[in-house]
Image (spheres, helix red, strand yellow):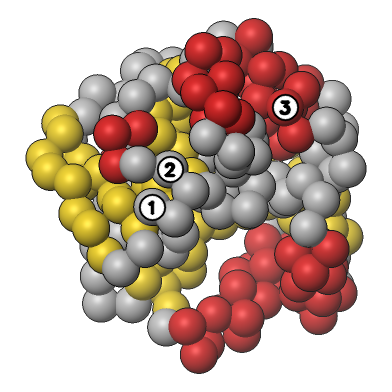
């Protein structure tokens, strides 16, 4: 019987690659843990709306486990959902973080509080190689959000290819966006039963960030 896990899921490339690796190793996902802004329709960080998250959940055939929270209650609500996942049989929570130590500590602290293990399958691997592995595995992802300090808004909506990764590097940004230069929304690939079709509505500028507003 395979070991069960809950996936800390953003809808982006790194968490999707971590999910893919775990499934290939024989682990069974029981849910996609996604944090959403309390009273709003979109997720934290990647700003993906619930309709699209539901569509992804159905295509991956993995249930959504939505954590609705304010910033002030983020840690507590996250831990509570981990406890629920443990009750459902998960022995660990998987994260897509690569090499930022504060992020790893946060993940491990929440899992420790909930009494489960934290697994980071991409940890300390070469950032650019991970992006290439993601692309070479057959996944398709669009750039959903950019930090305008690093990247211009015309990257929004572009499919992440090796040529686009090269363009990002040429601008002096990390090819993987691990420092928050950009965030992605994965729409197809080997784990998906159906491609996620969406409409591009508009570009929303909020301070230092440009966000592509999309919907079904």
Pick the front one: 47 or 194: 47
164 on left or right of 83: left
Q: State which quarter of the image contains the C terminus.
A: top left
Q: Estimate how packed mark 3 is, as few (under 14), some (14 to 19) or many (20 or more) residues with alpha carbons within 10 Å.
A: some
Q: Estimate how packed mark 2 is, as few (under 14), some (14 to 19) or many (20 or more) residues with alpha carbons within 10 Å.
A: many
Q: Which of the two discs, 3 and 1, sits closer to the camera?
A: 1
* Count of labels in the image: 3
Q: Secondary structure at mark 1?
A: loop
Q: Tell me how far mark 3 sits from mark 1, CA to CA.
A: 21 Å
Residue 203 location (% of width, % of height) = 18, 46
200 on left or right of 125: left
Instruction: Write down the quadrant of residue 102 in the picture.
Output: bottom right
Residue identified by numbered label 1 = 148
Q: State which quarter of the image contains the N terminus.
A: top right
Residue identified by numbered label 2 = 151
Disc marking residue 130: none
Tell me whether the residue at label 2 lies in contact with that at label 1, contact meaning CB atoms closer than 8 angstroms: yes
Residue at horizontal 34 percent and vertical 25 percent from the top: 158
Tell me whether the residue at label 3 lies in contact with that at label 2, contact meaning CB atoms closer than 8 angstroms: no
Residue identified by numbered label 3 = 128
* 127, above or below 66, in the image: above
Residue at horizontal 64 percent and vertical 11 percent from the top: 137
Dot placed on the residue nearer the N-terminal end, 3 or 2 = 3
Q: Tell me how far mark 3 sits from mark 2, CA to CA.
A: 17 Å
Residue 6 location (% of width, % of height) = 68, 51
Instruction: Write down the quadrant of residue 155 in the picture.
Output: top left
Q: Secondary structure at mark 2?
A: loop
Is there any visible trace of residue 100 in the rendered image?
A: yes
């Amino acid at each position: 019987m395979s070991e069960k896990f809950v996936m800390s899921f953003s809808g982006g490339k790194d968490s999707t690659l971590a999910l893919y690796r775990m499934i290939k190793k024989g682990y069974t996902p029981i849910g996609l843990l996604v944090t959403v802004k309390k009273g709003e329709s979109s997720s934290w960080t990647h700003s993906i709306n619930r309709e699209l998250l539901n569509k992804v959940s159905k295509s991956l055939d993995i249930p959504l486990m939505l954590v609705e929270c304010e910033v002030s209650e983020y840690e507590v609500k996250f831990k509570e959902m981990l406890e629920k996942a443990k009750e459902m049989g998960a022995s660990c929570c998987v994260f897509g973080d690569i090499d930022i130590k504060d992020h790893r500590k946060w993940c491990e602290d929440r899992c420790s509080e909930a009494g489960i293990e934290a697994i980071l399958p991409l940890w300390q691997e070469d950032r650019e190689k991970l992006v290439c592995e993601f692309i070479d595995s057959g996944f398709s992802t669009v750039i959903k959000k950019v930090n305008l300090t690093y990247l211009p808004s015309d990257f929004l909506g572009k499919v992440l290819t090796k040529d686009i990764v090269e363009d990002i590097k040429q601008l002096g940004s990390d090819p993987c966006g691990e420092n928050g230069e950009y965030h992605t929304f994965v729409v197809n690939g080997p784990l998906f039963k159906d491609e996620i079709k969406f409409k591009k509505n508009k570009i929303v500028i909020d301070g230092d960030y440009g966000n592509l507003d999309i919907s079904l």
